[in-house]
Image: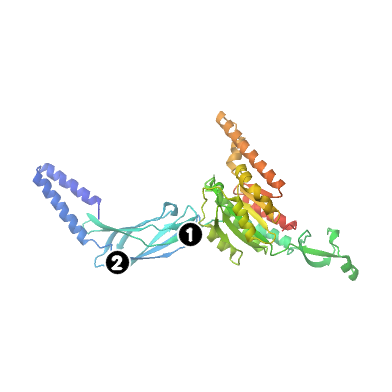
């Protein structure tokens, strides 16, 4: 049951009447009795909310930042119409327009559309439906709640997909479709063609030239069907916020761009999300990108230190032949020195390893500030943080590990460019 403002207004008028005309206990009792009778009559004439039947349809997945619509169909099997309000409650991060005026005649059904604009990744689950049916006098209402399950999975936005066409064009050049064929360690022989000025003389095939009437050169293309393993660190470091989003979101964006590029290059791409256990595992498939975004959507950072030994053991167990292993993690010195460095050798001895890390542009801004005493202290702290990252990068490089350290907007294309450089050099 719920009361309306109209009943409050009526009670105020009754109080005025008692004060001016019947300032006795009997007058108060009479006014209260009238209000009670009117309220009970109004409740009795209001449509029942218990017998309502509900069903849902509409969007089940949407990219972060894009709108979605969920349609709620309500059937009224009762004898009285429902007139009032309906609230389709969702978590605040779903960004739902959840209140609807509701008029449902007896024996009929009506559809109500709830519009969502999610502000976070993950599964947004509908909470409950509350229906308020107001009586014909507008003094009181019947109210009841119902559970009607529905989940909208909010997928990573994949902002970096805008960089994919330009990287695919460079990949086509490497692959020989634009007649820019290369030679390098680990590349595959493609075909023979006539020598032109500018060709590498080391590519001349003297036996083929002896049989032909011109100098012939060998052309090469990058090997296909190589393995790329993307390892997403979902531990404590990934929870740090850069701008309005955690580092994990920027790492996901970089992983999606690299996965899309490598799969188009003919390589097999696997993904592992790990902190102290495997949070997600996506093997290479023909539907790689949809599988990746669906698997990454519900993952949130864990506020625990990543088990680097367990992560490396998981990679080695899953990856038998030589592969490119891309670790999307942090460059903070303490976790590296205590966790990754002791076990890094077992990984670099078998695989090409690349570390990609999300840098905070705010740190660089603080390092350049000198306007006040406070900003000078901030600049000193920022300079120290930058020096620690440079030291970590140098130590990783000495161990034979490539490092890509960039701000969130620049990390995906920088990582894709490093992949293409490895491809061009024949190291993959």
Q: Position of residue 313 (x, y in %)?
A: 62, 55
Q: CA distance from mark 2 to mark 1?
A: 30 Å
The residue indicated by pointer 1 is 153
Of badges 2 and 1, the one in the foreground is: 1
Q: Position of residue 116 (x, y in %)?
A: 44, 57
Q: Nearer the viewer, residue 301 or 129?
A: 301
Position of the C terminus by quadrant: bottom right
Which of the labelled discs sits on residue 113, or is there none? none
Q: Residues within 10 Å of mark 1 (few under 14, many from 20)?
A: many
Position of the N terminus by quadrant: bottom left
- The answer to whether one can see residue 412 in this image is no
From the viewer's perspective, is residue 220 above or below residue 91?
A: below
The part of the image, by quadrant, that contains residue 392 is top right
> For numbered disc 2, what is the local secondary structure?
loop
> For numbered disc 1, what is the local secondary structure?
strand
Q: Position of residue 233 (x, y in %)?
A: 58, 52
Marks counted in the figure total: 2
- The answer to whether one can see residue 207 in this image is yes
Q: Residue at x 25, y 50 (%)?
A: 5
First reached walking from the N terminus: tag 2 or tag 1:
2
| Left or right placement of residue 395 versus residue 120 in this view | right
Mark 2 near mark 1, Cβ–Cβ under 8 Å?
no
Q: Residues within 10 Å of mark 2 (few under 14, many from 20)?
A: many
| Left or right placement of residue 80 versus residue 28 in this view | right
Outermost residue toward the bottom in this view: 211
The part of the image, by quadrant, that contains residue 207 is bottom right
Q: Nearer the viewer, residue 10 or 288?
A: 288
Give the colour scheme of this rendering. rainbow
| Left or right placement of residue 71 versus residue 300 in this view | left
The residue indicated by pointer 2 is 76
């Amino acid at each position: 049951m719920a009361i309306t403002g109209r009943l409050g207004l009526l009670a105020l008028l009754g109080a005025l009447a008692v004060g001016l005309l019947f300032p006795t206990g009997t007058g108060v009792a009479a006014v209260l009795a009238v209000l009670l009778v009117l309220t009970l009559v109004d409740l009795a004439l209001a449509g029942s909310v218990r017998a309502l039947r509900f069903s849902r349809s509409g969007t089940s997945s949407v990219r972060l930042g894009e709108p979605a619509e969920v349609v709620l169909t309500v059937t009224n099997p009762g004898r009285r119409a429902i007139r009032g309000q309906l609230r389709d409650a969702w978590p605040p991060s779903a960004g739902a327009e959840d209140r609807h005026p509701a008029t449902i005649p007896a024996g009929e059904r009506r559809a109500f559309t709830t519009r969502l604009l999610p502000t976070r990744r993950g599964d947004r689950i509908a909470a409950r439906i509350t229906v308020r049916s107001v009586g014909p006098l507008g003094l009181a209402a019947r109210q009841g709640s119902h559970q009607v399950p529905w989940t909208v999975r909010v997928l990573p936005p994949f902002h970096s997909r805008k960089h994919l066409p330009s990287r695919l064009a460079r990949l086509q050049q490497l692959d020989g479709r634009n007649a820019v064929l290369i030679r390098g360690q680990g590349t595959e022989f493609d075909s023979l063609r006539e020598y032109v000025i500018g060709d590498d003389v080391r590519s001349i095939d003297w036996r083929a030239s002896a049989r032909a009437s011109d100098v012939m050169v060998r052309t090469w293309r990058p090997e296909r069907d190589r393995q790329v393993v993307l390892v997403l660190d979902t531990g404590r470091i990934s929870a740090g916020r850069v701008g309005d989003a955690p580092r994990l979101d920027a790492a996901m964006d970089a992983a999606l761009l690299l996965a899309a590029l490598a799969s188009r290059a003919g390589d097999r791409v696997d993904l592992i999300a790990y902190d102290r256990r495997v949070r997600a595992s996506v093997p290479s498939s023909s539907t790689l990108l949809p599988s990746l975004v669906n698997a990454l959507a519900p993952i949130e950072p864990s506020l625990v230190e990543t088990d680097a030994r367990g992560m490396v053991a998981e990679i080695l167990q899953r990856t038998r032949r030589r592969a490119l292993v891309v670790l999307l993690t942090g460059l903070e010195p303490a976790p590296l020195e205590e966790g990754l460095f002791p076990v890094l050798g077992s990984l670099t001895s078998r695989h090409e390893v690349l570390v990609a890390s999300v840098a905070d542009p705010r740190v660089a801004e603080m390092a350049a500030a000198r306007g006040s005493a406070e900003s000078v202290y901030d600049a000193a702290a920022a300079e120290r943080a930058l020096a620690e990252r440079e030291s970590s990068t140098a130590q990783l490089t000495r161990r034979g590990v490539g490092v890509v350290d960039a701000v969130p907007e620049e990390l995906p294309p920088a990582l894709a460019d490093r992949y293409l450089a490895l491809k061009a050099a024949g190291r993959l």
